[in-house]
Amino acid sequence: MRENHQLSVISNEIDVANRSVRDEVASIFEQVIGHPVQINDDTDIVEDLGMDSLGVMNFVMAIEDFYDISIPLDRITQVQTVADLIAAVEELRSEA
Amino acid sequence: MTILAKHAAYKSRYDRLRAAGVDPFNVSFDTIISPTEGVMKGKPTILLGTHNYLGLTFDEDCIEKAVEANRTQGTGTTGSRVANGSYQGHLKLERELADFYGREHAMVFTTGYQANLGVLSTLVGRGDHLMLDADSHASIYDGSRLGGAEVIRFRHNNPDDLYKRLRRLKDQPGDRLIVVEGIYSMLGDTAPLKEIAHVKRETGAYLLVDEAHSMGVLGETGRGLAEVAGVEDDVDFIVGTFSKSLGSVGGFVVSNTPDFELMRIVCRPYMFTASLPPGVIASTLEALHKIRTRPELRADLMRNANHLYSGLAALGFETGPEANPIVAVVMPSQEIAVAFWKMLLESGLYLNLALPPATPTNAPLLRTSVSAAHTPAQIDTALDIFGQVGRALGLLPADRRRAAGAV
């Protein structure tokens, strides 16, 4: 567990503009799952967070809305960990 | 460890189901005796989950045509149309389908599944953009992977979300193809096709509608949801199946697109599989004739759909949003859904148990489909059984004993 990547997702009051993608993803995740969770780069979205396919889809769609991007299905299948998701978001934002 | 060990998660769920004494994915009938009745373990059983919308599987004329074709042309084509050639029946069915939909072109596939696989993988490829409703059928998802196009899902039945995602593509090159279904197979809800057609026009995309569950079911002449919504001119491709309202097996696509015939030499799920046998083609042709000449079948179907839908609602069950020939009953948990399904079957009523992730939400569904061939008495019997089981399992209050027949 890398301490500097530890996240508390109870961070809704932080100014959105100052947040990193990681903080934002964590916050969105909390909204979708409905309770606070501890996540880091290595967190496996399905295994560690117990999300089913519907949960993952809702989570991904919330991320897409927040960043005004669409993550194609083949990219979603490559995403396993939080770090993978952040990489996908950052890449798609840079393409947009 | 076996080579199938990778599916261990499914195995454990399946084992749990079977431990509860049911195997909803492996039901077998002793025999089927009519479009609405089978026999299971010696017990007469009402079929309320077989998508036999017009009840044509036992139509005398369809059977006779199939028998005659089998006698005169043999039982099978033993290969693809590319290798073994087309029979006159294949060509005639394509002409009749094109005529039914008022389109220039039609192409027949060996199953509805292959129709989606073939059409989606041929229309869009690498560099194109495929916009799928999130609740699309498995054949659409599988077809989307075969062609290599970029696949983007939009929220179910949400034209605004679709528009937003098309807008995000900005000036990226490549064709855009929107795919929606006439009636969605899990909840029986229809697509907001007028609004989706508007998005299509605004964004310059192509539009494909899968009318598998709506052909012969919706529309003044049975052409499906596009006919009801009055947007047939906006729909570039209609895909459908012979295995529901037409009572046989097979799939098709119709379109006015130029160069349509090119599909026959590039569409692999058309080229590399055996074509439909003469008997199937013959009964399908006759069934299409019935759709065109017996509109009362659609009236009977919708009467039965409304009867079942309003009856289930009156009993106190939560159903899908629209009264269509697919009526889904929402179950509170998998345990109750499995027990409910098993008790229905033991009471002589067969329908589909749909479990997540095959369902659009996390709720399990008891999915029914009615037929024009059901009698009002059969629908009443089904409602009675639903009421009895619902009360026995505590889903309905014990005092809510109003006769389903009075609904």
Image (tube, coloured by chain):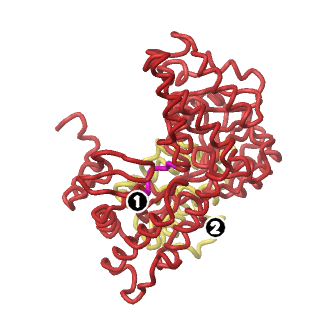
Mark linked to residue A16: 2
Question: Horizontal placement of B345 versus B63: left or right?
Answer: left
Q: Position of residue B128 (x, y in %)?
A: 67, 33
The residue identified by callout 1 is: A51
Give chain B's shade: red
Chain letter matching colour yellow: A
Q: Name the chief secondary structure element in magenta.
A: loop
Q: Secondary structure at mark 1?
A: loop
Question: Horizontal placement of B97 versus B14: left or right?
Answer: right
Pinpoint the chain carrying mark 1: A
Residues rendered magenta in the picture:
B48-52
Mark linked to residue B100: none
Q: Position of residue B315 (x, y in %)?
A: 47, 78
Q: Position of residue B231 (x, y in %)?
A: 79, 48
Q: Secondary structure at mark 2?
A: helix
What residue is drawn where x is 52% and y is 31%? Answer: B114
Assess whether mark 2 and mark 1 are in contact (beta carbons under 8 angstroms).
Answer: no
Front-most of residues A4 and B194: B194
Pinpoint the chain carrying mark 2: A
As for residue B50 lying within the magenta part, the answer is yes
Q: Position of residue B58 (x, y in %)?
A: 47, 42
Q: Please rate how many residues cluster around mark 2, counting C-alpha atoms within 10 Å: few if below 14, some from 14 to 19, many from 20.
A: few
As for residue A81 lying within the magenta part, the answer is no
Image: B46 above or below B260: below
